[in-house]
Amino acid sequence: MDAVIFSPLIDWVYVYAAVAAVAVVLVLLIWRRSPGWWLRGLAAGVLLLALVNPSLQDEDRDPLSDIVVMVVDDTASNDLTVRPEQREAAVATLTEEIEGQGIELRTVRVPDGQGDAGTELMTTLRDTLAEEPAGRIAGALMITDGQLHDLQRAPELEAPIHTILTGEADDWDRRLIIKNAPAFAILDEEITLSVEVEDQGAVPAGLPLDAELSIAIDGGEPQVFRVPVGQQLDLPLTLPHGGLNVIQFQLAVEPTELTDRNNAAVVQINGVRDRLRVLLVSGEPHAGERTWRNLLKSDSAVDLVHFTILRPPEKQDGVPVAELSLIAFPTRELFLEKIDEFDLIIFDRYKRRGILPAIYFDSIRDYVENGGAVLVAAGPDFASADSIYRSSLADILPAAPTARVIEQAFRPMISPLGERHPVSEGLEKFAPEPATDGVPGWGRWMRQIEVEEQSGQTVMTGVDNKPLLTLDRIGEGRVALLASDHAWLWNRGYEGGGPQLELLRRLAHWMMKEPDLEEEALKVAAQGATMTITRRSLEQTVGPVEVTGPDGQAREIELTEVSPGRFVATLEGEAQGLYRLTQDDQEAVIALGPAAPREFIETVATGEKLAGLVGQTRGGTFAISEGVPSLRLVREGRNAAGRGWFGLTPRNAYLTTNVTVTPLLSPWLFLMLAALLTIGAWLREGRR
């Protein structure tokens, strides 16, 4: 291809200055009516042309083919029903048609985004275009369901962009939306969860206006409700226990909906106990009584009611009864009417004295069977004839006294079962001194009440491996028996002291049914896509855990014992969504990412999201269900889409292989021509 170029011998600024000077002189000559002004102007023009050095440039060009980018949506939402077959058929047809026109095709596939990023069509298109020459791009095709999540990253493109939609015209889907879900909630206080059932797409006629919704907590038996579709529903909820509460929602699946991956949702709420209400029932004053009181009062989250006998009835000191107390102690309200308001009742060296009648002990027994908790710190009174064991509490206590009180120093030891129980597991780590030769590094106690275990689990032992701390479940409640009244020696620092506060904290939390201290539990936690499965058990071995993924496929995972009573395994989640775990009678659920990933929030194919971008580039939107469109070549600036066809814009790009530059005239010819014109002007003026 030939073209004239200019390579001035001086800077263009001086060329422009010379042109201006010549123009001024010519104007002056015209104004003075000089007869040879036009000859002088031509001479000056020849000189100026010589200064800009005109040359003829000849290029050898090799034409380059056009490039089309085809972005193929391989995300989860585009793998539903018949979409994979539609997608692959369209890819094959369009590839053959485009390459048949001699156009280079760049095919890129878009998987699910990292984490829960969704469909990143525009990011992929932008990155692909960045690697290609912009002057060769004849267009872009996107084979997708139209559901993307990065439209704001759309690139600027002069060529047309077309959308080739998968899916069918009668596609529809139903999904569950959790409108609000707090991360924390106070136990025994009602919270409200807002949910909504939403239908999308071409909803079949005659479908019921309500849907079946089941709700289960911590994998328990679900409760089933009928809820309206398309309306927000407020569900009141009270958390059943402290710690992590996993609430699972599941919509019944309709046969014709696109997917059930968005029919489930999981809400994880931490239950926080606002106040721990404790009733401390003490017998006659002793050295450990104030220790119990101080430990409980030191925690601002504990509301303590202390019932103690400072003056037993048999004491006769002549003090008038009316002066013994300002008000009567509300024993009836505490032990009958309001006993259910307490979270924990502690008996500290209490014995029967006729102050609490038998009906009160019956009330305490019923309180435990209905879900309450009782801790007995036994002293010599427990072995006496007035022991509280000689009441209806015997029905719930896990060990019976033998009437023997052992007065000798001993070091509390964790039993083999206690090494696996969460109340006593690893308790030696909290000792003031490290353990040596299997002996914990805490101080000794001086007295133990001999008891015979009748039920429950002994987690700590004392003299001659006799039961020291025994735990049991009674009905819906729990009971703990500490067969010694010398735990206060740890708090006082005798022989270095010991972890009394940690032991009491664990006991209280176990009695409050905190999930973290359940001896039989299955838990799972996620870090990214990695799940850590933990099975706690008092058994020596446990079986494999069955893990059911979001796709409904189940597999068994073997666990490894990492410490007594704790079995662990790790598992990489292959897909986002809800995972269900079962092992014997234990169940757990967890969601990797959201229970319904972003890919399944909207699943009905649509061209609306890409309509603005497609319209700006004069492209078109086509449904594969109506046939794959044919290809046409259109000129730049023309409409690039019509009924059943899409257009690509040829860019006529080329590669320059050789350039030859030849001056138009020799410098001597320019000089001779300028001289002739100057002489002509002189002769013309002289003839005048």
Image (spheres, rainbow, N blue to C red):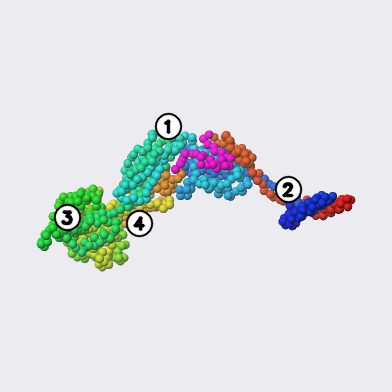
Q: Residues within 10 Å of mark 4 (few under 14, many from 20)?
A: few
Query: Decide: marks 2, 1 in contact (CB < 8 A)?
Result: no
Q: CA distance from mark 1 to mark 3?
A: 72 Å
Reading the chain from its start, which is encountered first: label 2 or label 4? 2
Q: CA distance from mark 3 to mark 2?
A: 116 Å
Query: Which residue is denoted by mark 3 in the rendering?
Result: 328
Q: CA distance from mark 4 to mark 1?
A: 57 Å
Say what secondary structure mark 3 lies in. loop
Residue 439 in sight in this render: no
Q: Using the image as rendered, state which of residue 410 and residue 445 is in the foreground.
A: 445
Reading the chain from its start, which is encountered first: label 1 or label 3? 1
User: In this rendering, which labeled residue sits more in front, label 3 or label 2?
Assistant: 3
Q: Using the image as rendered, state which of residue 154 and residue 558 is in the foreground.
A: 154
Find residue 317 and report its image quarter.
bottom left
Find residue 207 and report its image quarter.
top left
Query: Which residue is denoted by mark 2 in the rendering?
Result: 3
Q: Position of residue 660 (x, y in %)?
A: 74, 51
Which amino acid type corresponds to the residue marked 2 in the rendered image?
Ala
Which amino acid type corresponds to the residue marked 1 in the rendered image?
Ala
Reading the chain from its start, which is encountered first: label 4 or label 3? 3
Query: Decide: marks 1, 3 in contact (CB < 8 A)?
Result: no
Query: Which residue is denoted by mark 4 in the rendering?
Result: 562
Q: CA distance from mark 2 to mark 1?
A: 70 Å
Q: Residue furthest right?
A: 687
Query: Which residue is denoted by mark 1 in the rendering?
Result: 205
User: In this rendering, which labeled residue sits more in front, label 4 or label 3?
Assistant: 3
Q: CA distance from mark 2 to mark 4?
A: 82 Å
Q: Position of residue 418 (x, y in %)?
A: 27, 57
Query: Decide: marks 2, 4 in contact (CB < 8 A)?
Result: no
